């Protein structure tokens, strides 16, 4: 195919770059512009801007508020060091608790404390004071199902004298109608904007509740009562609640609880005779949690022996201990309480000699100690909890309180009579 000039139409050689007839250039030129150059000042400004942006991003990433979350334990760090925050129901600030499984039976309500502990992560020392200065707010709540028949209740967090090693505590109350899975949560906001969520799962299990009395069960003698206790302990699960209402009889032989807790309630006959144990009651170790409640019972002895020997947790309420070498003795790994009881003419009224145990409750209130050699003997009490003896009466005892272990006591409204 012939090559023609696009301008005049003349036939051209194949390799022509211009037309010999009209002298027009056959290869159009593109105008070349000189490269644009930025000033040194503008380049430096752009570089500084980029550098500032990088530094700003780094500062933001390192100083922006952070969120810390943990189950049972959280480690929080700032420029001053690292803090170990943990929660537990026990008076032990080095054992985090991510889950509490507890049972609820016949009692009107149950309670446990949720403690917040703050330790220096590196030394283990109590770092509560230094940490609390950095906090803007500390709150506690329980996240629970909306359809609970009885919602779990809790108090505002505060420092509690009962556990001086804890930075704060909240008291949590529940019943068997609160059964289900919930979560106890500490929410902490720091002054620098950081937030901390420290949680513990809570699983409340409603136990079976069994009640018996003399109308459907033979409880007339020590032997009959002992046989019944042994039978029930072998048939029901650990933690199930057993409440037995006793007839107004006198049990003349020792009665021993098998490896289970029992709640015994006495009655009073038309002649004023109350349910009476004349040879003592022994509560063996049935675990660290379950408590045997003893209500409205008389313990009447001959000046020897121990009326109530508790190697398991026990709580005597409105009971009378008369004429024993020792009225009530708590020993081994068992905390015991006594409230609104009478101890009279005993060598020792209440004797506490326990080891390695968390207290069930601090109340020893409303008791009367009269005519005893030593009303209260505190030989060993391995807890810093303040035992509350308020509203007690001490009368005509050789020694009112022998506090050999220097236990912290609340003696407000106590009457000492000679």
Image (spheres, rainbow, N blue to C red):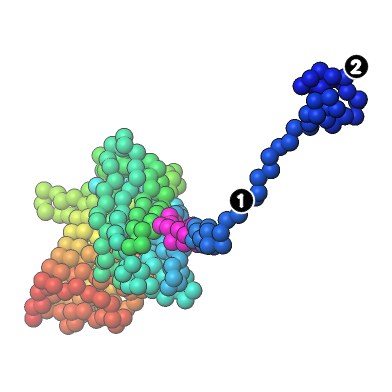
Task: First in sequence, mark 2 or 1: give its number.
Answer: 2
Q: Which mark is residue 258?
A: none
Q: Are marks 2 and 1 in contact (CB under 8 Å)?
A: no
In the image, what residue occupies the spot 15% across and 51% down? 268
For the residues labelled 2 and 1, the Cα–Cα distance comes to 45 Å
Name the spot of residue 390 as percent of width and height, x first.
15, 69
Residue 65 is a magenta residue: yes
Of the 4 image quadrants, the one containing the C terminus is bottom left
Label 2 Cα crowd, 10 Å radius (few <14 / some 14-19 / many 20+): few
- Which disc number belongs to residue 1? 2
Tell me if 298 is positioned left or right of 353 in this view: left
Question: Which residue is depicted at the point 24% across and 47% down?
Answer: 108
Identify the magenta region.
54-68
Please state, as top left, top right, bottom left or bottom right, where the N terminus lies in the image: top right
Prevailing secondary structure class for the magenta stretch in the rendered image: helix
Q: Is residue 217 visible?
A: no
Q: Where residue 272 appears, x then y in whole percent?
A: 11, 54
Q: Residues within 10 Å of mark 1 (few under 14, many from 20)?
A: few
Q: Nearer the viewer, residue 110 or 374?
A: 110
Q: Is residue 45 visible in this depiction of the protein?
A: yes
What secondary structure is marked by label 2? loop
Q: Which one is in front, 74 or 41? A: 41
Q: Position of residue 242 (x, y in %)?
A: 33, 46
Question: Which residue is more in the foreground, 413 or 298?
Answer: 413
Q: Residue at x 28, y 77 (%)?
A: 407
**x, y percent for residue 311:** 38, 65
Q: Is residue 342 above or below residue 53?
A: below
Query: Would you say residue 213 sits in the magenta stretch?
Result: no
Q: Secondary structure at mark 1?
A: loop
Q: Which residue is mark 1?
A: 36
Residues 363 and 43: in front is: 43
Seen in the picture, residue 11 relative to 232 is either above or below; the reply is above
């Amino acid at each position: 195919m012939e090559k023609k000039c696009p301008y005049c139409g003349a036939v051209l050689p194949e390799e022509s770059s211009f037309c010999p007839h009209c002298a027009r250039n056959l290869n159009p030129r593109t105008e070349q512009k000189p490269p644009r150059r930025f000033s040194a000042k503008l380049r430096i400004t752009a570089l500084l801007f980029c550098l500032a942006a990088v530094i700003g991003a780094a500062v933001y990433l390192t100083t922006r508020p952070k969120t810390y979350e943990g189950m049972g334990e959280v480690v929080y760090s700032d420029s001053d060091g690292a803090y170990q925050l943990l929660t537990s129901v026990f008076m032990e600030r080095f054992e985090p608790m991510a889950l509490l499984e507890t049972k609820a039976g016949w009692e009107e309500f149950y309670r446990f404390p949720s403690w917040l502990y703050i330790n220096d992560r590196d030394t283990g020392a109590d770092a509560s004071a230094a940490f609390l200065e950095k906090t803007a707010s500390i709150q506690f709540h329980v996240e629970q199902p909306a359809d609970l028949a009885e919602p779990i209740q809790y108090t505002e967090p505060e420092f509690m004298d009962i556990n001086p090693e804890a930075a704060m505590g909240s008291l949590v109350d529940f019943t068997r109608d609160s059964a289900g899975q919930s979560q106890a949560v500490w929410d902490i906001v720091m002054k620098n904007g950081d937030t901390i969520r420290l949680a513990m799962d809570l699983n409340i299990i409603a136990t079976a509740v069994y009640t018996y009395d003399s109308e459907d069960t033979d409880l007339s003698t020590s032997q009959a009562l002992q046989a019944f206790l042994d039978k029930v302990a072998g048939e029901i699960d650990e933690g199930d609640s057993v409440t037995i209402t006793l007839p107004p009889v006198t049990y003349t032989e020792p009665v021993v609880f098998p490896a289970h807790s029992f709640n015994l309630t006495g009655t009073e006959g038309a002649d004023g005779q109350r349910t009476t144990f004349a040879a003592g009651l022994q509560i063996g170790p049935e675990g660290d949690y379950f408590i045997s409640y003893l209500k409205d019972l008389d313990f009447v002895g001959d000046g020897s022996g121990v009326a109530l020997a508790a190697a398991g947790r026990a709580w005597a309420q409105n009971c009378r201990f008369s004429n024993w070498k020792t009225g009530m003795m708590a020993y081994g790994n068992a905390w015991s309480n006594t409230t609104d009881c009478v101890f009279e003419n005993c060598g020792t009224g209440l004797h506490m000699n326990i080891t390695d145990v968390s207290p069930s409750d601090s109340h020893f209130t409303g008791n009367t100690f009269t005519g005893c050699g030593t009303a209260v003997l505190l030989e060993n009490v391995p807890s810093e909890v303040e035992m509350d003896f308020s509203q007690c009466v001490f009368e005509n005892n050789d020694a009112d309180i022998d506090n050999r272990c220097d236990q912290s006591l609340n003696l407000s409204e106590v009457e000492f009579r000679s």
